[in-house]
Amino acid sequence: MSEYISLNPEYGPDPDLVTLITNLDLAPEGVERYANRAEGEEGSPLAQFLFQIEGLAALEIDGKRLIVRRAPEVEWHTLLDEIAEALKEFFL
């Protein structure tokens, strides 16, 4: 396991969606898709942990990628900081 976690955001045309590329294998069992908080709260341990973050609306976990949909009222910088902290806590 790496001693640090890198998190590189890639923004697209949808202002409420971002792809986060990490240096971790986040989904060793295959792609996980959670269309909403209720699905995430019943998902994998990582999904359950991440869905504790306020403002996370939907999530896809695919290998080293997290595809995140935010609630429109949440600022990206706040949400990304919280996701980074959650990943550190979960994996380190």
Image: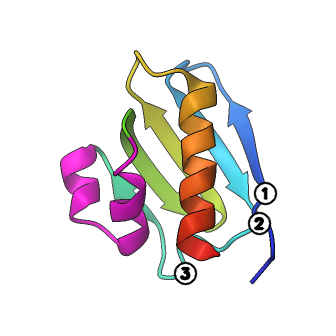
SS label for mark 1: loop
On the image, numbered disc 2 is attached to which residue? 23
The answer to whether marks 1 and 2 mark residues whose Cβ atoms lie closer than 8 Å is yes
The answer to whether marks 3 and 1 mark residues whose Cβ atoms lie closer than 8 Å is no
Separation (CA) of disc 1 from disc 2: 6 Å
Q: Which mark is residue 38?
A: none
Q: Residues within 10 Å of mark 2 (few under 14, many from 20)?
A: some
Q: Residues within 10 Å of mark 1 (few under 14, many from 20)?
A: some
Image quadrant containing the C terminus: bottom right
Q: Tell which circle, 3 or 1, labels the residue nearer the N-terminal end.
A: 1
The amino acid type found where label 1 is placed reads Ser
On the image, numbered disc 1 is attached to which residue? 6
Q: Residue at x 81, y 75 (%)?
A: 3
The amino acid type found where label 3 is placed reads Pro
Front one among 6 and 12: 6
Q: Quadrant of residue 69?
A: top left
On the image, numbered disc 3 is attached to which residue? 28
Separation (CA) of disc 3 from disc 1: 18 Å
Image quadrant containing the N terminus: bottom right
Q: Position of residue 16 (x, y in %)?
A: 49, 23
SS label for mark 3: loop
Q: Position of residue 13 (x, y in %)?
A: 62, 19
Using the image, determine if residue 85 lies above or below residue 26: above
User: Overall secondary structure of the magenta stretch?
Assistant: helix
Q: Residues within 10 Å of mark 3 (few under 14, many from 20)?
A: few
The amino acid type found where label 2 is placed reads Asn
Q: Indicate which label's residue lies in the foreground, 3 or 2.
A: 2
Separation (CA) of disc 3 from disc 2: 13 Å
Residues rendered magenta in the picture: 36-53
Q: Is 41 included in the stretch rendered in magenta?
A: yes
